[in-house]
Image (tube, grey):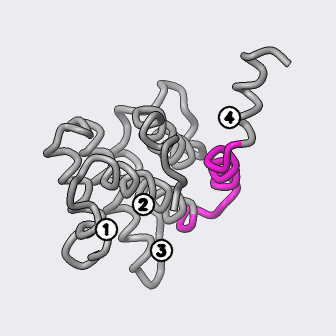
Amino acid sequence: MSKENEKLDTLLNHPLTQLIQEMAITPARFQIILANGLLEMITNVIIKHHCKNHKIILANNQTYTYATRLLILNEKGLIDDAFYDLLRRFNTLRNKAAHGGKFYFKREWIDQFAPIFPKALPDGQKLSYICNHLTFNYYNANHETLERYPLE
């Protein structure tokens, strides 16, 4: 097997790839919650690697919420402002999905992510695209760090 095929095989069998494939067939509410869970796991690994007080940050979810952890990474320059804004917006969407009794998916929730969409993306594919875009880009931007730690 060539090196290129070996890399492709590794990527296709990576647990993150398998979860993303499952997200595409999952109802919207759970797709959002699952994608945000992956983003939060990635965030925690980055915190663990780059913050000397990571044990304090990761041990206290009330003081150091996911939103606060994203802010810490943004302030340290580990997440640029544009991507931080996307992650923050997606976390707000996750909170609506996770904490609302009835979840009625609204078009304006998706429209706030319009700048990342390819031009001819059908409406029915936009949520999956957002989840995949955020997860893959976050992983790819931090793959060297993430490969040092198992996702927990």
* Residue occupied by mark 4: 11
Q: Answer left or right for 29 relative to 113.
A: right
Q: Name which of mark 1 and mark 4 comes first in the sequence.
A: 4
* Boundaries of the magenta span: 14-30
In the picture, the disc for residue 58 is: 1
| Foreground label between 4 and 3 | 4
Instruction: Classify mark 2: helix, strand or loop.
Output: loop
Residue 106 occupies quadrant: bottom left
Disc 2 marks a residue whose amino acid type is Lys
In the rendered image, the quadrant that contains the N terminus is: top right
Give the mark nearer the N terminus: 4 vs 3: 4
- Expressed as whole percent of the image width and height from the top left, the position of residue 76 reads 16, 43
**Residue 103 image label:** 3
Q: How many numbered dots are placed on residues in this image? A: 4
Tell me which residue sits at (19%, 45%) in the image.
74
Residue drawn at the location 78% of the way across and 20% of the way down: 5
Q: Identity of the amino acid at label 4?
A: Leu
Of badges 3 and 1, nearer the viewer stands 1
| Vertical arrangement, residue 32 with respect to residue 74, above or below | below
Give the residue at mark 2.
106
Place of residue 47 in the rendered image (x, y in percent of width and height, measured from the top left)? 30, 53
Which is nearer the N-term, disc 2 or disc 1?
Answer: 1
